[in-house]
Amino acid sequence: MKTVTCTAPVNIAVIKYWGKKDEDLILPTNSSLSATLGQDELRAKTTVAVDSSFKEDKMWLNGKEEGVVSKRIQNVFRETRKRKGNQDSVDGLNQKIHICSENNFPTAAGLASSAAGYACLVYSLSKLFNVQGEISDIARLGSGSACRSIYGGFVEWQMGSLSDGSDSIAKQVTHDHHWPEMCILVLVVSDQKKHTGSTQGMQISVQNSTLLQKRIEIVPNRIKNITKAIIDKDFVTFAEITMKDSNQFHAICLDTYPPISYLTDVSRQIISFVHQFNDHCQQTKVAYTFDAGPNACLYLLEEDLPRVVSLVNHYFPPQNNGLTLTIQGRPVTLQTPTQEDKDAINIPVSPNSIKYLINTKIGKGPQVLSDPKECLLNDDGLPK
Ligand code: DP6
């Protein structure tokens, strides 16, 4: 049995992907740009294996066996097998594959786990089959946003123009160590609601949102400007474009008929908190962005982290009795919020609105784990 085990990161878009012009090839209506998050906090881990004794392709996700019949999985398998390198002993076309994958964060956190999952699957298969060259286009066939998780740092998914999708690929904008002061704070909002999935939501937006058509004209300039801001480490410009793009994406969701609303009252309070804090500082120090759910992702610089986390904890405490919010990931030293800060920010104190925080930084792309202990499958090719 030959096995490969890899990890892959989550990414959070600052210029959102929302709309496809080809559902099968997953070709987007606009380019998008994201930051890859640190894998110590958020990652998918996948083992792929081939052996002549395997009777069929099999997959286990977070401990549960899942079918491999979905078109997206089949497209990923077909494309990876097609590009198998010559010098390898693995018979990519005929041997069956076993896959076992798990995340180090709860799916209940409502974070896009499919991007990390598909990126990890494609990266692992590419190592197993010795695929050379570009693989972000294969990850794209699994889930559009997954192509951006193939690289670390800031990453652009260039929409491309070819009808076969061969130029719809991810390109690294900057390395993971380019902007070390940048922090990402995920505010996991307490919310049980089931939201319209991205795939379905964007399909309806493409069908009937006129604002989405307008957005297609707006995005190229935004990508150009935010890329320059990232390269120049110009936080103010970066943050303003990030917030405007998140707001435009959610405006398109409301412009969709019937409307889709991902933001909740808590999300809107977080938006209000960020703007009031920035106004009070007379400088844009924090940016928010929201995906297809109510959780906020804040981008901010290290120097402002203790003050911002302490204020988040003040306005969104776990309960009434003054406990502090759980912070997963990198530790933060909390401070007592100053009276001046509290006077300047006029939002209600809302206990139990945020479940916990995840504090992370910009991270690396997928990694191979060579230690056999990391393997998720036993000698029979079944989950350990
Ligand atoms: C709001 O990549 O999950 O997170 O391609 O249909 O699998 P499919 O959609 P998906 O959409 C992500 C949408 C988003 C914005 C983004 O990540 O750019």
Image: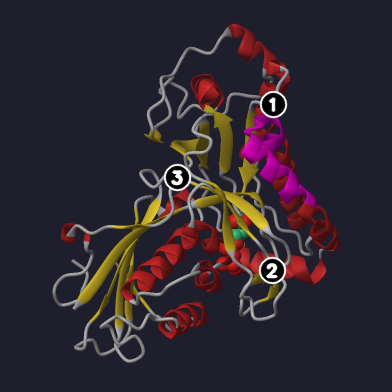
- Along the polypeptide, which appears first: circle 3 or circle 2? 2
Horizontal placement of 328 versus 234: left or right?
left
Query: Residue 135: which numbered mark, if any?
Result: none
The residue lying toward the viewer, choosing from 20 and 309, is 20
Question: Where on the picture, by quarter, is residue 341?
Answer: top right
Q: For this rendering, which residue is in front, 347 or 100?
A: 100
Q: Which residues are magenta?
A: 221-239
Sort mark 2 into few (<14), some (14-19) or many (20+) by Cα contacts within 10 Å: some
> Is ligand 1 closer than 8 angstroms to the Cβ of mark 2?
no
Q: Position of residue 232 (x, y in %)?
A: 65, 35
Q: Mark 3 is on which residue type?
A: Gly
Q: Secondary structure at mark 1?
A: loop
Q: Which badge, 1 or 3, is on the more N-terminal residue? A: 1
Measured along the vertical axis of the image, is residue 308 above or below residue 51? above
Count of numbered marks: 3
Residue 160 is marked as 2
